[in-house]
Image: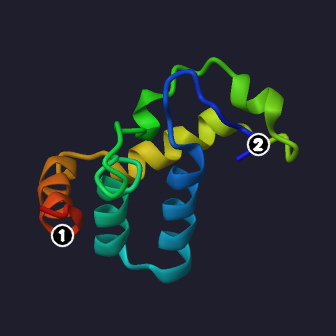
Amino acid sequence: RYCLPCPSGVDIPGCFEIYNNFYLSGNESEAKLMYAAKPGGIIRGDVPGYASQCIQCGQCVEKCPQHLDIPSLLEAVKEKFEGKDLKGWKILAKKTFRKE
């Protein structure tokens, strides 16, 4: 969370958590659902914070104690989870996680 706040509202820790969990578990469906739900703001009833919102300003890099190239890593997250099927995953996430 050292990298926050992001001026574009990207949920950097949430994006990386789901990306890393996908590579640990290999469960792409679960990862896509969680990406639509968590950075998508559905679980917390918040605004979306998707990786694609990154404007490459570099403020997060300056704050990162590990000196990670966060904008490049967010690009990889975007490529993995923000395909044509994101809209469908958002619909499923709303049905799964929203409390009426």
- CB under 8 Å between callouts 2 and 1? no
Q: How is the image coloured?
A: rainbow
Question: Which residue is labeled 1 in the image?
Answer: 96
Q: Nearer the viewer, residue 68 or 6?
A: 6
Q: Where, by quadrant of the figure, is residue 72 drawn? A: top right
Circle 2: element type: loop
Residue 79 in the image: state x and y as whole percent: 40, 45
Q: Nearer the viewer, residue 49 or 84?
A: 49
- Residue 96 figure quarter: bottom left
Specify few, some or many for label 2: CA neighbours under 10 Å numbering under 14, 14-19, or 20 or more: few
Q: Secondary structure at mark 1?
A: helix
Q: Amino acid at mark 2?
A: Tyr
Distance CA(mark 2)–CA(mark 1): 30 Å
Q: Position of residue 13 (x, y in %)?
A: 60, 51
Q: Earlier in the sequence, mark 2 or mark 1?
A: 2
Image point (12%, 64%), residue name: 95
Residue drawn at x 28%, y 72% as measured from the top left: 29
Left or right of 12 on screen, residue 87? left
Q: Residue at 34% x, 36% y: name it.
A: 47
Q: Which disc, if any, is residue 2? A: 2
Closer-to-camera residue (53/43): 43
- Amino acid tagged 1: Thr
Quadrant location of the C terminus in the rendered image: bottom left
- Image: 85 above or below 96: above
Nearest to the observer: residue 67 or residue 39? 39
Q: Residue furthest right?
A: 65
Residue 81 drawn at (x, y percent):
35, 52
